[in-house]
Image: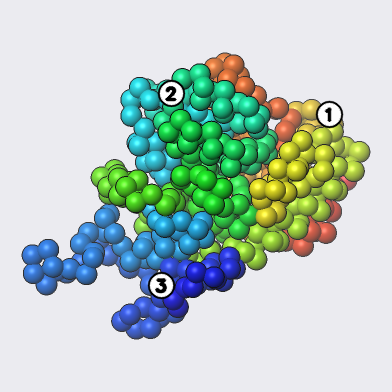
Amino acid sequence: MTQSATDRFATLAVHAGVEPDPTTGAIMTPIYQTSTYAQTAVNQHRGYDYARSANPTRTALQKALAALEGGRFALSFSSGMAAIDTLLRLVRPGERVICGNDLYGGTFRLFDKVLSEYGLIFTFVDTADPAAVPAALAAGPARLVWLETPTNPMLRLADIAAAAVAAHKVGAWLAVDNTFASPALQRPLALGADFVIHSTTKYIGGHSDVVGGVIVMNDEAAHERLQFLQNAVGAVPAPFDCFLTLRGIKTLSLRMAAHCHNATAIAHFLAEHPAVERVIYPGLPTHPQHELACRQMAGPGGMVSFIPRGGEAAAHTIVCGTRLFTLAESLGGVESLIELPAAMTHASVGGPEAQAAGFAVDPALVRLSVGIEDVDDLIADLDTALTGR
Ligand SMILES: *Cc1c(COP(=O)(O)O)cnc(C)c1O
């Protein structure tokens, strides 16, 4: 199925990157479970010589992911963290990275506990404040601006287009972790970003059955360097993982619509609930950046955070009191999950340096990854957990 430049997102999600298998006509890209490929003469092959360097299942996935983000190139990895680690190898020792102060916990750990030991310098700022990135760029040279929007778990937004202008003015790159929105709701390259990264483990895979990551970009030289690093460092995804991710992508458009629909209904339900103190959801008019969410995103997403009345103890009772929402880390799958970030996903950001840098996740904050079940069942489940009945 050759794709056309005018294909819309739901069409791309089904068709991009996938051609009927040339040898059999199989409609779905086969799992090329092989480590090497026969050569007809020395170095004579069909573009595939060793599976760390390239694999046809991975090629199809990379093409699909590039198309979904509206980029020219994509490189897939064995996890989101591997994608982030590889991208950060474009930054040299002594160079500075400006990044948000409520990043995904694993990203903060990689920056603060690993890459800083190799001489990269990280400046953490509140990227929800439109003045923060320009101020940090004015304070000294930087190679890269790193944004997460919406952030995890506070669901703060950063203005991607404004950050791109500010970064490019001083010759820095802008990278956006688009995991929470997915390309169905937000396309950072079109807003001026140089790199988009995803944990494809989340919405893109969508079924809680595979771990993976991707970098998408338009620049040919950056792609060449990152492809070299992908092969040199070697954190590549297995063919079966690529197949599962490709399979998940087919329904991304439908799933994101259902996630947004259900999360919107749940956010409104929680906002009215007497046992809830505060709800954080970009789709609520009470969200401080609701206007930016409407401008930058095609939908408010499937993540909802809230603080119950009764503090941490109440939060512990609630996360153990649901039937359909499973108490678990991760997000973005078809099934609803509930968790306590301060004690679970964000436990690694609890140290004093983290607190000083502005990473303070309220110990009572409950995070929901709203799935695609019937929303009335989900609301009834939350009501039971909140009221203890
Ligand atoms: C999960 C996640 C990552 C890390 O991805 P893995 O696939 O778990 O390695 C990075 N960023 C965000 C926003 C995430 O949610």
Q: Which residue is mark 3?
A: 29
Q: Name the N-terminal-most of marks 1 and 3.
A: 3
Q: In the displayed structure, does residue 6 sit left or right of residue 82? A: right
Q: Which mark is residue 141?
A: 2
Q: Please say whether residue 155 is visible from this viewpoint.
A: yes
Comparing labels 1 and 3, the label whose residue is closer to the camera: 3
Q: Please say whether residue 381 is visible from this viewpoint.
A: no
The residue shown at (34%, 51%) is 220
Q: Looking at the rendering, in which quadrant would you find the C terminus?
A: top right
Q: Measured from the top left, where is residue 288 in percent x and y?
A: 77, 35
Comparing labels 2 and 3, the label whose residue is closer to the camera: 2
Q: In the displayed structure, does residue 291 sit left or right of residue 86? A: right
Front residue (pair 373, 289): 289
Q: Are marks 1 and 2 in contact (CB under 8 Å)?
A: no
Q: In the displayed structure, does residue 315 sit left or right of residue 356? A: right
Q: Which residue is mark 1?
A: 310
Q: Secondary structure at mark 2?
A: loop
Q: Give neighbour class at mark 1: few <14, some 14-19, many 20+ (Cα, 10 Å).
A: few
Q: Measured from the top left, where is residue 380 in percent x and y?
A: 84, 53
Q: CA distance from mark 2 to mark 3?
A: 45 Å
Query: Mark 3: which amino acid?
Result: Thr
Comparing labels 1 and 2, the label whose residue is closer to the camera: 2
Q: Measured from the top left, where is residue 259 in percent x and y?
A: 69, 57
Q: Are marks 2 and 3 in contact (CB under 8 Å)?
A: no
Q: Quadrant of residue 126?
A: top right
Q: CA distance from mark 1 to mark 2?
A: 45 Å
Front residue (pair 51, 123): 123
The residue shown at (65%, 59%) is 256
Query: Mark 2: which amino acid?
Result: Pro
Query: Mark 1: which amino acid?
Result: Gly
